[in-house]
Image: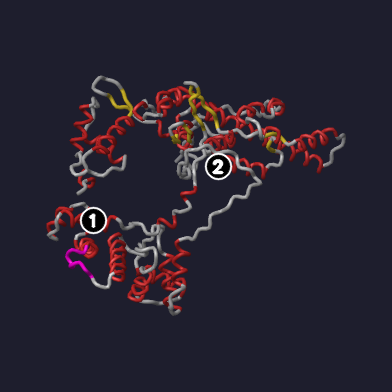
Amino acid sequence: MSLGQSLQQRQLQRLSPQQIQLMKLLQIPSAQIEQRIKEEMEENPALEMNADLLDTDTSAAADDLNDEFLQGANEEEEAVPVDEFEMSNEDLNEYNYDEDVADYKTKDDYYPELDNDVVIPIKAEVSLNELLINQLNMLALDETSFKIAEQIIGSLEDDGYLRRALTSIADDLAFKQSMWVEEKDIEKILIQVQQFDPAGIAARDLQECLLIQLKRKQADARMANSVDANPARLDPIKLAIVVIEKYFEEFTRKHYDKIQKSLYLNEIEIKGVLQQILNLNPRPGADTNESHTSEMYIIPDFTVVINNGIVELTLNSRNAPPLIISDDYKMMLKEYERGKKQDKSQKEAVFFIKQKIDAAKWFIEMIQQRQQTLLKTMKAILAHQQSFFTTGDTTQLRPMILKDIAAATGLDVSTVSRVANSKYVLTEFGTYLLKYFFSESLTTDSGEEVSTKEVKAILLEFIQQEDKHKPFSDDELTHQLQQRGYNIARRTVAKYREQLNIPVARLRKEL
């Protein structure tokens, strides 16, 4: 049997290392670009900051950086044009890019450059684990019980819940610490840990978390009043415990009328009971674990201001730092090249210097191309959504998808996506992720195309103004939107409501 052979010719598009690095630089937000430049400068001593331009407008000066060396680069090592590295999403799937961008909380303000000589105080914080261990050290426990408690505390999740089975904790103690304990022994220690602060800690589910807090409130109330003046059935804390123990499913589904009938309560009494429960903390560990998150903020990549009725766009100077080639490396290269005789070590030195200078040139070009791509994309978005940037009215947002901006800029959809998913713009009406301005269209009765964000804004307005005792159903919301001229189906209203994280009418109902 003979083996058949064939010759096939295929045209494939592959990204060069420079193109890959350019795309990675493009998706880095302003908050991280300085760190990336610092890392590059540490690796390449031929790359430096231009001290003369640090106190000037670096955005304007960046275009003139190192012109003599960029123009004197070898013709074979041309800069990579932005359009040349454009790839389709299908092609880009061959590479593993980290598309995740760290979440930052918004702080609508301008951020001046920090003085390096200023000592910034760091807020001293105690983690949830440290807080619980400190309380554990105050208990008189034997060594075995102490280690069990430590294992329980170490198994808690960020919100303070213990979602690991007690059998799994027993296995951990056996394998890691050679301790063989019964599940009932772990249960006893768990009850002690559940008495720690914050109240509700180490609960295994929401029901247990609420019960722990209610029983502690009950104990505190008894200590404050040696004699219970209220009959048992009128004590709102006791009734709240009954509700959580026996009617937890009805409570979570907001079937308050069923609870009220079952316990023979009037309107005032059921409201008092529900108020006791709603004042509890469903995530007892979150306040401690998330305290540091509130200190984080966004560093906008763009700023849009209205000056005498004209919308002006500026790029954050962090995106265009004044980078230059080191004068020392340029002088060293000239001195080595002037030498008539070059031994092996000198040739290696020349090769090393040229390599570092070329790498520095390339990195400066990449930063400049990053700046041009960001500006090109943001200008197109600004032109498309100019009504919003001048008024701040969400209903003025026009339908816009990635293809619209890609067509306006000549960039690939994947490039626009990278910019939109990781860059922020500071406006006079707040700070927005560029992705916020993208939305699909919906046709009105008059045939006009409007943004789905406009429909969501009006839907939110209806829900905020509704009677909370008789909230609108999805059918009623659909009817109201249709009266406004929006041709929309009920299932679409339900989808938009869910995207706005708004529960169904039954769960919005208040007594």
Q: Quadrant of residue 74?
A: top right
The residue lying toward the viewer, choosing from 234 and 191, is: 234
Q: Nearer the viewer, mark 1 or mark 2?
A: 1
Q: Is residue 429 magenta?
A: no
Q: Which residue is mark 2?
A: 32
Left or right of residue 51, residue 505 in this image: left
The total number of labels drawn is 2
Q: Which residue is mark 1?
A: 274
Q: Label for residue 347? A: none
Q: Quadrant of residue 148?
A: bottom left
Which residue corresponds to the image point at 37% horizontal and 59% vertical from the top-left?
284
Q: Element at badge 1?
A: helix
Residue 249 appearing in the image: yes
Q: Element at badge 2?
A: helix
Q: Quadrant of residue 274?
A: bottom left
Which residue corresponds to the image point at 12% horizontal and 59% vertical from the top-left?
264
